[in-house]
């Protein structure tokens, strides 16, 4: 870390992960970056480029509406828009920082846009697969309206074990808010939404 400048924002995320296996950050991306990503998502969604989400990894996907109801579009870094290039630039810088300060060994990432239409949800689950344990950190960044209200639903409920008792943390999807948590440790769910909910969701992955 001799030539690596300490980044307070990244350190905030690291501290949260070390203390409680998750962290909530409201200003990881600038307001301008968030709005640009939101506009990009909306354009691509209106172009009918999204598909119904599935469960399982890409080798064994199944569409099960009773478990999740969102529509997704995978991001391709090689063909990224300007807004997406800015997003990946910051994510790559964050990954480099994690690898150099925490020796996490992250060598791959995957992200997609997600749109939850009114009335949809994602049942409680863990972000890992029986035949693929490479996901290390889960990341969600919300791209909702600036005037998003808690009564619109769509909370991310993260389930914690505190001294043998279960506790749920509800994260409201306010515009620009980002959540980072341990993929293999924390079960979570998306509560039913009462207004269309937009986000980028992804994972930082190790070699397994």
Image (tube, rainbow, N blue to C red):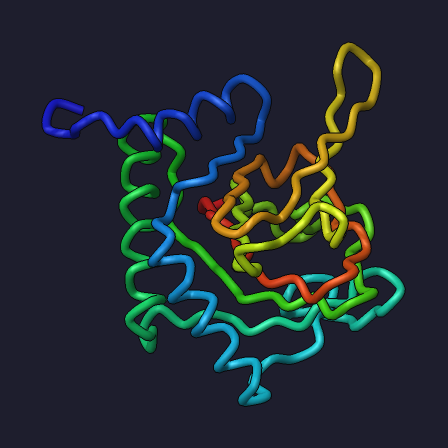
Residue at screen point 41% across, 58% down: 34
Please tell me in which quadrant of the rendered image residue 80 appears.
Answer: bottom left
Vertical side of 167 occupied by 199: above or below: below
| 42 relative to 131 in the view: left or right | left
Q: Foreground residue, 30 or 14?
A: 30
Residue 31 x, y percent position in the rendering = 38, 52
Q: Is residue 170 left or right of residue 145?
A: right
Instruction: Tell me the residue at 18%/24% (across/down).
Output: 1
**Residue 121, placed above or below residue 113:** above
Left or right: 66, with 155 as reference point: right
Q: Where does residue 157 sit, x and y in percent of width and height?
A: 74, 40
Residue 137 percent coordinates (x, y) = 52, 41
Where residue 174 appears, x then y in whole percent? 58, 48
**Residue at the image position 64 percent from the left and 68 percent from the top:** 115
Which residue of the protein is positioned furthest toward the top in this rendering?
Answer: 163
- Residue pictured at 67% horizontal, 72% vertical: 71
Query: Which residue is outermost to the right?
Result: 66
Q: Residue furthest bottom?
A: 47
């Amino acid at each position: 870390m001799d030539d690596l400048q300490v980044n307070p924002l990244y350190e905030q995320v690291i501290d949260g992960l070390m203390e409680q296996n998750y962290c909530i950050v409201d200003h990881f991306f600038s307001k301008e970056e968030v709005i640009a990503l939101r506009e990009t998502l909306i354009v691509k969604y209106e172009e009918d480029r999204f598909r119904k989400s599935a469960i399982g990894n890409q080798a064994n996907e199944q569409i099960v509406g009773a478990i999740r109801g969102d529509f997704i579009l995978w991001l391709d870094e090689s063909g990224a828009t300007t807004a997406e290039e800015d997003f990946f630039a910051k994510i790559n810088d964050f990954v480099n920082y994690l690898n150099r300060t925490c020796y996490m060994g992250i060598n791959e990432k995957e992200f997609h846009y997600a749109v939850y239409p009114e009335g949809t949800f994602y049942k409680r689950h863990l972000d890992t697969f029986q035949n693929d344990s490479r996901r290390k950190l889960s990341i969600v960044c919300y791209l909702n309206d600036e005037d998003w209200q808690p009564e619109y639903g769509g909370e991310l409920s993260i389930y914690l074990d505190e001294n043998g008792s279960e506790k749920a943390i509800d994260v409201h999807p306010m515009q620009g808010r980002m959540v980072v948590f341990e993929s293999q440790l924390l079960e979570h769910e998306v509560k039913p939404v009462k207004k269309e909910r937009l986000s980028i969701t992804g994972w930082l992955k190790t070699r397994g």
